[in-house]
Image (cartoon, rainbow, N blue to C red):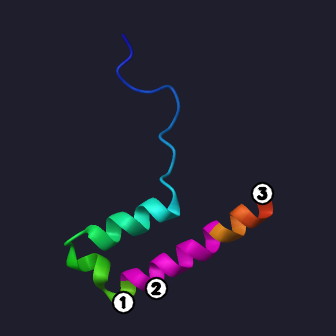
């Protein structure tokens, strides 16, 4: 019996991550450094999505 999936787990959508971060009580997610890193990731993801379209 296989206990693990055959494929890798897909990354969650950007919107899902944003909602979870806003709902979290973790103070690290509210810091400016995290916000800067997150904006950078968002730009990269949107660029990849634009290339696919």
Q: In which quarter of the image is residue 41?
A: bottom right
Which numbered circle lies on residue 52? 3
Q: Which residue is drawn at 19% across and 72% down?
A: 25
x, y (%) of residue 16?
A: 44, 60
The Cα atoms of the two marked residues, 3 and 1, are separated by 31 Å
Whether residue 40 appears in magenta in the rendering, the answer is yes
Q: Horizontally, is 37 left or right of 51 in the view?
A: left
Relative side of 53 to 12, left or right: right
Residue at 31%, 86% in the rendered image? 31
Q: Residues within 10 Å of mark 3 (few under 14, many from 20)?
A: few
Q: Is residue 2 above or below residue 38?
A: above
The Cα–Cα distance between marks 2 and 3, rounded to whole angstroms, is 25 Å
Q: Which residue is label 1 attached to?
A: 32
Eye-nearest disc, 3 or 1: 3
Instruction: Pinpoint residue 11: horizontal percent, then vertical percent.
Output: 50, 51
Pointers 2 and 1 in contact (CB under 8 A)? Answer: yes
The stretch in magenta equals 34-45
Instruction: Indicate whether 18 appears above or below 9.
Output: below
Q: Indicate the quadrant where residue 30 lies.
A: bottom left
The answer to which of marks 3 and 1 sits earlier in the sequence is: 1
Task: Classify mark 1: helix, strand or loop.
Answer: helix
- Do residues under tags 2 and 3 come within 8 Å of each other at their CB atoms? no
25 left or right, relative to 52: left
Q: Would you place residue 14 above or below residue 33 in this image?
A: above
């Amino acid at each position: 019996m296989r206990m693990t999936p055959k494929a890798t787990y897909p990354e969650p959508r950007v919107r899902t991550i944003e909602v979870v971060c806003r709902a979290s009580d973790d103070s690290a997610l509210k810091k400016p450094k995290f916000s800067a890193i997150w904006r950078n990731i968002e730009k990269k993801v949107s660029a990849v999505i634009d290339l696919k379209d």
